[in-house]
Amino acid sequence: MSIRKPLGAQPAPGHQFATLGGGCFWCLEPVFAELEGVVDVESGYSGGPVDNPSYRQVCEGDTGHAEVVRLEFDPARISYREILEVFFAVHDPTTLNQQGNDVGTQYRSVIFFHTPEQQRTAAEVIEQARSAWGRDIVTQLEPAPAYFRAEDYHQEYFRHNPAQGYCMLVIAPKLEKFRKTFARKRRASAAV
């Protein structure tokens, strides 16, 4: 799968974007890269007023951006609802500005919707998640603001650094949980 969509590109005809923040983008990107119907995944920053922020600036928490993944998907092969069901299964939407040891507004749970239909679907899925988790859901639901592609070394981070400590201790278990839970929705070509 290519993760090299140029900054500012539009999805291919008939495709849509989904932009999601659920903690470190290193954790979300490999999950969605294996999902059948997702044709492109890119790590980036969204939700803050600073243009073209750097990773260092975002990590300092002063830009207002969240670490996000931007997905291009084919709705004829996977629905936006299915993407959000995976999203809520692979991160904790009940902890404000935190995922595990990653703490700060840059790690917030957020759905940036691209269309009114995505907004309606996301609101419904958030309500379903509230029932499933049995707790308040802190996931923000906002119109998609400017998106900025993260630096090249963040793209496909897990694939390029599987022996790195964070990858082995945090990302690999999350990816394994996804593979077990959503086996039928995974790409046939995805490595097990």
Image: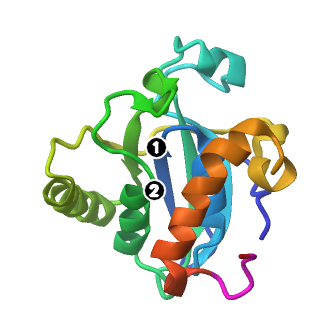
Residue 59 position (above or below residue 174): above
Residue 44 position (above or below residue 192): above
Disc 1 residue crowd, few under 14, some 14–19, many 20+, Cα 10 Å: many
**Residue shown at 28% from the left, 66% from the top:** 117
The N terminus: image quadrant: bottom right
Q: Secondary structure at mark 2?
A: helix
Image quadrant assignment for residue 139: top left
In the image, 130 versus 14, the foreground residue is 130
**Residue shown at 65% from the left, 15% from the top:** 57
**Residue shown at 18% from the left, 62% from the top:** 128
Residue 184 position (above or below residue 58): below
Residue at the disc numbered 2: 90
Residue at the disc numbered 1: 22
Disc 2 residue crowd, few under 14, some 14–19, many 20+, Cα 10 Å: some
Q: Is residue 9 visible?
A: no
**What stretch of residues is rendered in magenta?**
187-191
**Residue shown at 46% from the left, 43% from the top:** 22
- For the residue marked with disc 1, what is the amino acid? Gly
- For the residue marked with disc 2, what is the amino acid? Val
Q: Earlier in the sequence, mark 2 or mark 1?
A: 1
Residue 102 inside the magenta-drawn segment: no
Q: Are marks 2 and 1 in contact (CB under 8 Å)?
A: yes
Q: Secondary structure at mark 1?
A: strand
Q: Position of residue 181 (x, y in %)?
A: 46, 74
Q: How is the image coloured?
A: rainbow
Q: Position of residue 126 (x, y in %)?
A: 22, 55
Q: Is residue 24 visible?
A: yes
Q: CA distance from mark 2 to mark 1?
A: 8 Å
Q: Position of residue 102 (x, y in %)?
A: 52, 27
In the image, 103 versus 142, the foreground residue is 103
In the image, 29 versus 45, the foreground residue is 29
